Each structure stands twice: as structure tokens, then as C-alpha cells.
Image: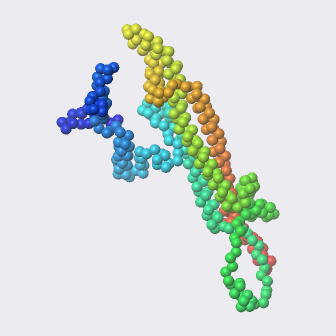
Amino acid sequence: MLTMRPLNEDKTWGSKQKKEYILDPQGQKIYDKKKHSYKCKSIPATDWNAQTKAEEWRAAWADIQNEYLEGLNLAERVDHRSFERQGIDQIPTIHLGVAAHQMEKRGIDTDRGNINRAIKFANQKLRNLKTQIKELKSDIETLLSQKVTPPITQTQPQEITTPPTATQQHQITAPQPSPIAELNILEMLKNMLNDPQAKAKVQRITSLSVVKSAVEFLEQYNITTLSKLQKTLTVTENKFDEVNEKSKSIEERLKKLNPLIKQSDLYLQHKEINKLYKQQKPKHKGRFYETHRTELTLYEAAERFLKANLDGTTLNTKAWKKESAQLTAEKDELYQSYRQLKEGVRQIGVVRRSVEHILDNAEKMEQPQQQRRQDMDR
């Protein structure tokens, strides 16, 4: 809280505002017959109450805090901007307040504290999934740039021929453009499983059940190449962004709606008590208030809250509760979508690991075949 009053040169408080008369086109003061006074308006003595000043002060306060944090060699930093302005993709928590903060410190759960815990939990899950998607995209791009041909091929015996002529030699050594067929990861994994010796081969580098799970996922979504896998991951990422945006929108609305519903219920619940209190004779009011202090305190707090947040609209508790129920149902549906996306990302990760393991260990898997050929040659 900051004062709006300026300080005079003699160190006394100055006026918060000054009165200025409203003049007509001729420059004369306008007389208000109803109020029996000249019309006037209040002019602030300073610009301290302007919104631009609030932004300026908040930025300056953040800078001062960060200076001290840096001086103490602490990694934490303060930013006065909202998450949206900072480009941080997460749901903002709500203001806890002094009373709720003290209760939470004593281990007492509060409504606001529970809302913030739910928001923080949702943010953590969304961050984790976003990180997994980002890492998978990078891994698949690496595989696409390095692994383009099947890793396991049968070595064909070389034929003994006459030495090539000069023209033939030129044709052989001249660079020949050749299209590169992208590796069919589905066929590669299926061939590995259909090979009679697949179990022995695969188990040297990974679990057979992991490869089977990868094949099932690829067949379910008709994914045959790493490019298609990458496109599937991109679609998943877009769906995740959509779910994330909808979740933030719903949380923002519920953060405003649920307190309105709660305070409206308290207002209506204790409205009759407040009416009886106002009907009491002055000498009986004090005793009545003490008897019904809890109800009247809740009513007064609810009345203040509603006046500050209704913006002139009337109470519409029934419509608010209906909207809250609909938003909560949408939120549950989005959570189910999130779980499906999470499972899809997990399956893509399984495919990526299976392909990577087999490609990276192709030489190791070929060693038994090479050993047998060498034994036969001997």
C-alpha cells in the first residue's frame, strides 16, 4: 500500500486532490440548482494513482528485489509481469490472502490453498508432457538424419569377372545419383519378431515385449516410417497445445466463478439475519450483533466481495452453478484427453527406443551370423 498524498517542502502531507470548477463555453462557472453549488471535478494532485505508474513501480520493486537476490547469490528472480506476458505457458495461481496464508502455515487447508495446489499439480503434469514431446521430437529428428536404410542386410557373394574396360571403369567411378528409400520401421520390427531367432537377437539389446508393444502401436495408427512417426508426434503436440489452452481458459473462468458462487450462497444464507439486525432498536443492536456475530460477519464479507466483483450485475447463482458444472465436466473431459495424449507419447517413446536400439546395435545383432559364416569358411 502506498500513499496518494504528496509531501510538501515543509515535510507536511499535501492534499490528495484539488477541486476544479467546470466552466461553460463563456468561461463561467456552472451552477447546479439541485445541489445548490457550482459544478466541479476533482483533479489528483499527483499521477501516482495512474495505471502506468503502478506498472512502473512494480517493475522497479522487482528490480530492487532481484538486485538483493543476486547479491546473496540466489538463483531465484522476481518478475512483475503476468505469465502470459512472460510467455510462460502455465495456469496462474490465485492470490492466497493473509488469512488463508496464515492458516496454511499452521497446516490448515483452505479453499484458496486447495485451488492453488490443484493448479500447481496440473501445471506440473502439463510441463512434464511438454518436455517429453520436445525430447521425442529431437530424438526422432536425429534418427531421421542418421538412419535412412535398414540396418540388417544379407551380404551377397561377389562374382569373379574379367577386368572392366576404361569406359566401364569410368561408368563405375562416376557419381550416380540414387534415391534413398526411407527405412520402414514397421516392417523392420515385424521381421525381427517373425524371425525364428528374433527372441535371441532382440533380447540382446531390449525386451521382446517392448518391441511387440511398438509394433502394435505402429499398426494401430498405420505408421510405417520415422517421418510418419514424426508427423504423429506433431499432431499429438498440437492436440496437447489445444488441451492446454482450453484448460487454462476453464481454470481462469472457474477461479472467478467459484468464489462468486460461494460468496453469493453466504450472502443469501445470512441475508435474513442481517435484515433482522437492521430492524433492531439501537439499544438492542449491540447484543443482537454479538449473538449473531459469525453470521453477520460472513454476510458483511460476502456483501463487500460481491460489490467489488459483480460490476453492477445482479446475483445469478443458479446460472453460475450451471456454468460451473459444465466447465467442471469439460475439465474432466480434457483430463481424459490429456491421459490419452500422455499414453500416446509413451507409446511413441517405446517405438523410438526400439528402433534406436535395433539400429544402434545392428552390428552386434549380426555378429552371430558373421561368426557362423566364418566357421563355415574354415
> For the point 27% across and 32% down, which residue is it?
26
Q: Is residue 98 above or below residue 218?
A: above
Nearer to the camera, 182 or 103: 182
Residue occupying the point 56% across, 25% down: 317
Name the residue at 44% across, 17% down. Answer: 293
Relative height, residue 348 to residue 125 (above, below): below
Q: Is residue 353 left or right of residue 95?
A: right
- Closer to the camera, 69 or 6? 6
Q: Quadrant of residue 5?
A: top left
Quadrant of the frame with the N terminus:
top left
Report whether residue 18 is seen.
Answer: no
Asked where in the image residue 125 lies, by quadrant, the reply is top right
- Give the side of residue 332 with respect to residue 31, left or right: right
> Eyeballing the image, is 18 above or below 54?
above
Q: Decide if residue 63 is on the left or right side of residue 263.
A: left
Percent across and percent down for residue 153 are 75, 71
User: Residue at point 59% right, 60% down?
Assistant: 138
Residue 233 in the image, given as x and y percentages of width and height: 64, 55
Q: Is residue 291 above or below residue 200?
A: above
In the image, 86: left or right of 248?
left
Residue at the extreme front of the image, as rendered: 26
Total numbered circles: 0
Q: Position of residue 22 (x, y in %)?
A: 30, 30
**Residue 325 visible here:** yes
Which colour assignment does the render follow?
rainbow
* Percent position of residue 208, x then y: 74, 57
- Quadrant where the C terminus sits is bottom right
